[in-house]
Amino acid sequence: NAGVTQTPKFQVLKTGQSMTLQCAQDMNHNSMYWYRQDPGMGLRLIYYSASEGTTDKGEVPNGYNVSRLNKREFSLRLESAAPSQTSVYFCASSSTGNPQPQHFGDGTRLSIL
Amino acid sequence: DQQVKQNSPSLSVQEGRISILNCDYTNSMFDYFLWYKKYPAEGPTFLISISSIKDKNEDGRFTVFLNKSAKHLSLHIVPSQPGDSAVYFCAASGFGKLTFGTGTRLTIIP
C-alpha cells in the first residue's frame, strides 16, 4: 500500500534556484494538501486542492505555486528558493466530506543555502 | 496567532501508566478535532478524532475528551507502551482545512 508518495526525500538548493516537489496518492482521494513543518511551529498549510482542477491558498502561500496535475498528483513549486523556505514539506490527501482524516506522505526535507 | 495550542512541548511517562496530552483552541467555529502521531522521518498518522457534538471518543487504549466550554481537548493513552513514544499533534477542522498545534513529544520510560 503506497498511500501518499513524495519525491524527493531530501534536497539541497542554493538561494535563487527553482524546484518542484512531487506528490502522488493512490487512494482515489479528491482533496490534497501541502504543509511545511518548522521547529516549534507545527504543520502549516501552504496550499490545498479540494478537488481536481481547483487550488486555494493556505496559511503560508507566499513564495510557492502549486499544480493539481490530475486527481492523483499535486506538485509544489519554489520559483526562487530562499533560506526561509528551509523546512520539511508534507503532502497529504483526504476523501471528500467533512471531516475526513488526512493521510500524509513521509515528507521532503529541503535545505536552502 | 496560534489558534490551536499544545502548551507542553514534552512529556515523560512510565510504561504502563496513563499518558495525558492536552490541547487548547480559540476558534469556536472548529467542528471536529483530530490527534495525529508522528515518528521521526515519517509523516503524521491519524490516531483518533472527535466531533464537536460529542465529549468523548474511545478507541482501544486511546480516548479523546472534548470540553467545548473550556475549548480544551485531551488525549489519554492507557496503558502507555514504549511504541507510543512519538510526537503527538492535535488538529482542529474548520471550513475543510486542518489547523495543527505545535506538538508534544511523548517519551515512555521502560
Image (cartoon, coloured by chain):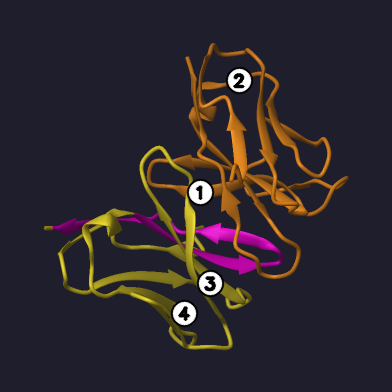
Q: Secondary structure at mark 2?
A: loop
Q: Colour of chain A?
A: orange
Q: Chain of mark 1?
A: A
- Magenta-drawn segment: B87-109
Q: Which chain is depicted yellow?
A: B
Q: Residue A101 occupies which quadrant of the picture? A: bottom right
- Furthest toward the right, the residue is A53
Number of the front mark, 4 or 1:
1
Disc 2 residue type (three-letter)? Ala
Residues at marks 3 and 1, CA–CA distance in whole angstroms: 15 Å
Is there one chain holding both mark 3 and mark 2?
no
Please name the residue that numbered disc 3 is placed on.
Answer: B33
For the point 88% across and 45% down, the residue is A53
Please name the residue that numbered disc 1 is placed on.
Answer: A43
Q: Chain of mark 3?
A: B
Magenta segment: does it hold B94?
yes
Residues at marks 4 and 1, CA–CA distance in whole angstroms: 20 Å
Please name the residue that numbered disc 4 is placed on.
Answer: B71
Residue B23 appears in the figure: yes
Q: Secondary structure at mark 3?
A: strand
Please name the residue that numbered disc 2 is placed on.
Answer: A81
Q: Chain of mark 2?
A: A
Q: Nearer the viewer, residue A90 or A30?
A: A30
